[in-house]
């Protein structure tokens, strides 16, 4: 199958032939090349992303590896701690909580009692003295006794009204007493409010404190264990 | 000396073109584009399509320029890329299929002494079916061997041979017709 003569002729003539491409051809190639060039940096960025993610995975991997080393030894203690936690939780929830409730109730009761007592004392304090005043006043003015009786009624109903209306007939002692009464009333009123909050909030507070202490315990224990593992690893590395 | 200098210049330009120097790329393009369009035209009848194929082939030339080992001729390397691009265009776009017959006759056409112009030669080649055309171009014009052509086209060596023999037969008849016409006009 030797090349024929006419084929030689074909080859020579075709190889010598030149066809000039259109002027647009280079422009098209130029734009294609510039497009390809713009694509290249993106490829590089892709590689960067891949490298970055690889480094990230390495970091995460090493972090988890270190964590695993810690957690290998911790579970035993975690169990113990859980038990202690259970003990802690069970005790305060079953018995102490009741106690707390009881104590709260008693506190409420006591405080109520005290408040009642203080109130009654106030009334006692308030009532006899204004009556004394009224006695003096009744000696002085007969009509005023009626007003004071009204005052007395008002006083027994409202302490504030007493303090408000007293100044009308007030002497220096009266003013002092009313002031004292105000203070006392405020003091007696405050414990009531406190007690109301205590009932629900105390439990939460105690729980929160327990949890906090538990957390602290866990953290300290984990830290201790971590330190021991660290030391052990360091020793092993040194030995190696 | 001149040839060595030219060669050195070319390697310089190629190096610059590898670094996406547009001027160097344009230099290479303007040096070889007319020849390469001629090559593409051998395979593709439509000059516009031939130009399209040439442009994509040049894209491949520039993107793979860093892979060019300065061993063979640079023109030959570009030419091979062009031929491959033309073949893949014909196979993918035109879905050329080769009849798997392995019938071929070894005939010699030495007695045919053609005195055709390039246009006439191109006309004769254009008249061939795409399968025949490819094998004929690769074998007779590019100088590939049958086993190489078989690999390039993904066909049997026998098929390549039979395609060539069919192409030659067809060309022979065409040439005789042309000659008769020429004689008639003369």
Image (spheres, grey):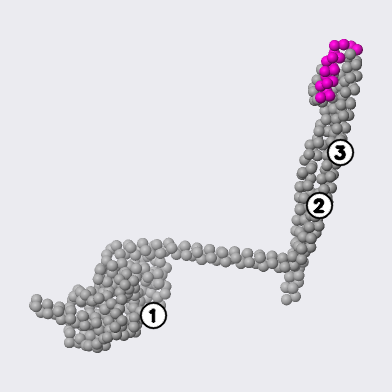
**SS class of the residue under badge 1?**
loop
Q: Residues within 10 Å of mark 3 (few under 14, many from 20)?
A: some
Q: Which callout, 1 or 2, points to the residue nearer the camera?
A: 2
- The answer to which of A99 and B157 lies nearer the viewer is A99
Chain under disc 2:
A
User: On the image, numbered disc 2 is attached to which residue?
Assistant: A94
Chain under disc 3:
A
In which quadrant of the rendered image does the C terminus of chain B lie?
A: bottom left
Q: Specify whether disc 2 shares its chain with disc 3.
A: yes
Question: Would residue B62 appear left or right of A159 to someone viewing this image?
Answer: left
Q: Quadrant of residue A11?
A: bottom left
**SS class of the residue under badge 3?**
helix
The answer to whether any part of residue A14 appears in the image is yes
In which quadrant of the rendered image does the N terminus of chain B lie?
A: bottom left
- Who's the residue at 23% across and 74% down the image? B126
Q: Which mark is residue B71?
A: 1
User: On the image, numbered disc 3 is attached to which residue?
Assistant: A110
The magenta stretch spans which residues? A139-157
Q: Residues within 10 Å of mark 2 (few under 14, many from 20)?
A: few
Q: Main secondary structure of the magenta part?
A: helix
* Cα gap from disc 1 to disc 3, whole angstroms: 108 Å
Question: Would residue B24 appear left or right of B165 to someone viewing this image?
Answer: right
- The answer to which of B115 and A227 lies nearer the viewer is A227
- Who's the residue at 34% across and 76% down the image? B80
Question: Would residue B153 appear left or right of A114 to someone viewing this image?
Answer: left
Residue A156 located within the stretch drawn in magenta: yes
Image: B64 above or below A104: below
């Amino acid at each position: 199958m030797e090349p024929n003569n006419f084929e030689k002729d074909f080859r020579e003539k075709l190889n010598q032939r030149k066809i000039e491409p259109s002027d647009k051809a280079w422009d098209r190639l130029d734009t294609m090349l510039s497009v390809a060039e713009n694509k290249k940096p993106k490829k590089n960025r892709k590689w960067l992303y891949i490298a970055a993610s690889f480094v990230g995975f390495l970091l995460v991997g090493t972090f988890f590896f270190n964590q695993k080393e810690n957690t290998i030894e911790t579970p035993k203690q975690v169990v113990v701690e859980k038990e202690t936690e259970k003990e802690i939780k069970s005790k305060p929830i079953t018995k102490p909580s009741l106690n707390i409730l009881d104590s709260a109730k008693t506190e409420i009761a006591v405080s109520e009692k005290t408040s009642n007592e203080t109130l009654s004392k106030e009334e006692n304090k308030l009532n006899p003295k204004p009556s004394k005043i009224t006695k003096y006043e009744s000696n002085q003015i007969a009509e005023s006794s009626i007003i004071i009786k009204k005052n007395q009624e008002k006083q027994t109903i409202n302490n504030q009204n007493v303090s408000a209306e007293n100044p009308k007939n007030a002497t220096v002692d009266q003013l002092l007493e009313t002031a004292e009464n105000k203070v006392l009333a405020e003091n007696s009123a405050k414990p009531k409010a406190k007690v109301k909050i205590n009932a629900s909030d105390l439990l939460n507070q105690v729980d929160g404190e327990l949890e906090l202490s538990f957390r602290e315990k866990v953290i300290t224990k984990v830290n201790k264990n971590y330190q021991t593992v660290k030391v052990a690893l360091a020793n092993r590395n040194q030995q190696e | 000396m001149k040839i060595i200098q030219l060669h050195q210049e070319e390697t310089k330009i190629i190096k610059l073109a590898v670094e996406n120097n547009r001027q160097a790329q344009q230099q290479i393009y303007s040096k070889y584009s007319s020849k390469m369009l001629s090559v593409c035209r051998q395979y593709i009848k439509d000059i516009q399509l031939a130009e399209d194929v040439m442009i994509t082939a040049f894209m491949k030339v520039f993107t793979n320029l860093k892979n060019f080992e300065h061993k063979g001729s640079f023109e030959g390397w570009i030419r091979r890329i062009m031929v491959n691009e033309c073949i893949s265009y014909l196979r993918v776009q035109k879905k050329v299929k080769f009849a798997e017959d392995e019938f071929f006759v070894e005939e010699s056409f030495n007695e045919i002494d053609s005195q055709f112009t390039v246009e006439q030669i191109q006309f004769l080649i254009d008249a061939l079916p795409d399968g025949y055309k490819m094998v004929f171009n690769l074998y007779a014009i590019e100088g590939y061997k049958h086993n190489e052509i078989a690999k390039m086209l993904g066909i049997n060596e026998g098929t390549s041979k039979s395609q060539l023999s069919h192409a030659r037969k067809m060309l022979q008849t065409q040439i005789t017709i042309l000659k008769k016409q020429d004689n008639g006009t003369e």
